[in-house]
């Protein structure tokens, strides 16, 4: 049976994964010395075992080094393999040098992760200018689509609505979700001038679409919230009175969540990829089979 480790047992996906895999929970002592450096001790014997690390990679600059220590220590202690389940994969948006001299952090981060683990599973990792994680990750890396759980939420809600993708990139998931739910959709056009400076334009809304009065904005990530705020403003100007927002990853930088609610979002729903206060849809059913598959592939590669 594999061992499931995490540096943060309060992660919303830890217990569902532990219950669903099945796996044995790996015990750790993890704390910080008074100067802030990490102390880590692996308490469960790991020699000859397959280890799965569940990690929250939001604000990765403080979380990545402890994760590296853990992965490297598991290997030093004889683990057969170390796999990473990072439902939200950080450092995917700097996917090219937009200006000369910029650090290509997506590629550098991928190189470091690929050194530490045998495989990676994540959900909707902002594959925009990259088409596959294999372009930057040198270990088997599986990018799952969160769409099925979003479809499930929309289907259960059962309210006719217009689905709205804020930008060209969102077409890939909005179109698929709309087809599966039998709902109409539109896709906007976004111009980003800075971290918190975006403009979203929506195509002309037909009388039939406007008559729905209800819209659901669908996106992969909410960070500063400005993409969604712009989209809300355009929808309100078009007469929509019930606006919901459905996203896979709710980063909610700063006061983004409050700003969205103040702007009039009725339901703000994200997945349990990231701990937070928003209502959540559960990614666990998506993750279980791919984790089994990664472990089976490993056994196959090792000739077991
Ligand atoms: O909440 P926000 O701060 O607005 O960020 C969230 C938005 O950012 C991402 O797209 P991005 O603008 O990075 O698209 P790009 O890949 O085209 O640059 C993402 O797909 C969201 O639409």
Image: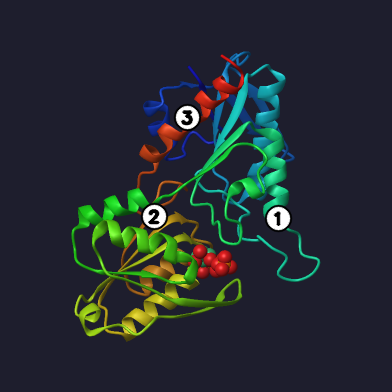
- Quadrant in which the C terminus is drawn: top right
From the image, tell me which residue sits under label 3. Answer: 293
**Residue at position x 72%, y 36% in the image:** 115
89 lies left or right of 108:
left
Up-down relation of residue 226 to residue 7 (above or below) = below
Across and down, in percent, residue 113 comes to: 67, 40
Q: Is mark 3 within 8 Å of ligand 1?
A: no
Residue sitting farthest toward the right: 101
Front residue of this view, candidates 156 and 226? 156
Q: For mark 3, does the 10 Å Cα neighbourhood hold few (<14), some (14 to 19), or many (20 or more) residues? A: few
From the image, tell me which residue sits under label 1. Answer: 105
Residue 280 visible, this angle: no
- In this rendering, which labeled residue sits more in front, label 1 or label 3? 3
**Residue at position x 50%, y 76% in the image:** 190
Q: Distance between the residues labelled 3 and 2?
A: 26 Å
23 lies left or right of 7:
left
**Residue at position x 60%, y 13% in the image:** 45
Up-down relation of residue 287 to residue 219 (above or below) = above
Front residue of this view, candidates 64 and 159? 159
From the image, tell me which residue sits under label 2. Answer: 270
Q: What element carries label 1?
A: helix
Q: What element carries label 3?
A: helix
């Amino acid at each position: 049976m594999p061992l499931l480790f995490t540096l943060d047992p309060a992660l919303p996906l830890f217990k569902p994964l532990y219950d669903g895999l099945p796996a044995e929970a790996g015990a750790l002592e993890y704390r910080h010395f008074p100067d802030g450096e990490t102390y880590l001790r692996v308490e469960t014997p790991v020699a000859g075992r397959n280890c799965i690390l569940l990690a929250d990679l939001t604000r990765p600059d403080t979380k990545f080094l402890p994760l590296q220590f853990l992965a490297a220590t598991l290997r030093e202690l004889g683990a057969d393999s170390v796999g990473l389940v990072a439902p939200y994969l950080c450092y995917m948006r700097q996917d090219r040098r937009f200006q000369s001299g910029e650090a290509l952090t997506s590629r550098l981060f991928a190189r470091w992760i690929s050194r530490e683990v045998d495989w990676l599973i994540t959900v909707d990792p902002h594959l925009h200018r990259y088409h596959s994680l294999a372009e930057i990750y040198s270990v088997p890396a599986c990018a799952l689509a969160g769409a099925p759980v979003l479809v499930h939420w929309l289907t259960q809600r059962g309210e006719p609505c217009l689905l709205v993708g804020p930008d060209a990139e969102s077409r890939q998931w909005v179109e698929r979700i709309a087809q599966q739910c039998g709902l109409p959709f539109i896709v906007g056009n976004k111009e980003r001038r800075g971290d918190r400076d975006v403009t979203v334009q929506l195509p002309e809304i037909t009388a039939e679409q406007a008559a729905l009065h209800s819209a659901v904005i669908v996106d992969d990530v909410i960070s500063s919230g400005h993409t969604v705020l712009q989209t809300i403003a355009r929808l309100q100007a078009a007469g929509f009175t019930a606006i919901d927002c459905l996203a896979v990853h709710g980063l909610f930088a700063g006061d983004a969540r409050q700003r969205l609610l103040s702007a009039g979002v009725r339901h703000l729903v994200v997945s349990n990829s990231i701990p937070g206060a928003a209502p959540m849809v559960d990614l666990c059913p998506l993750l279980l089979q791919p984790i089994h598959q990664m472990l089976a592939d490993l056994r196959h590669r090792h000739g077991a």
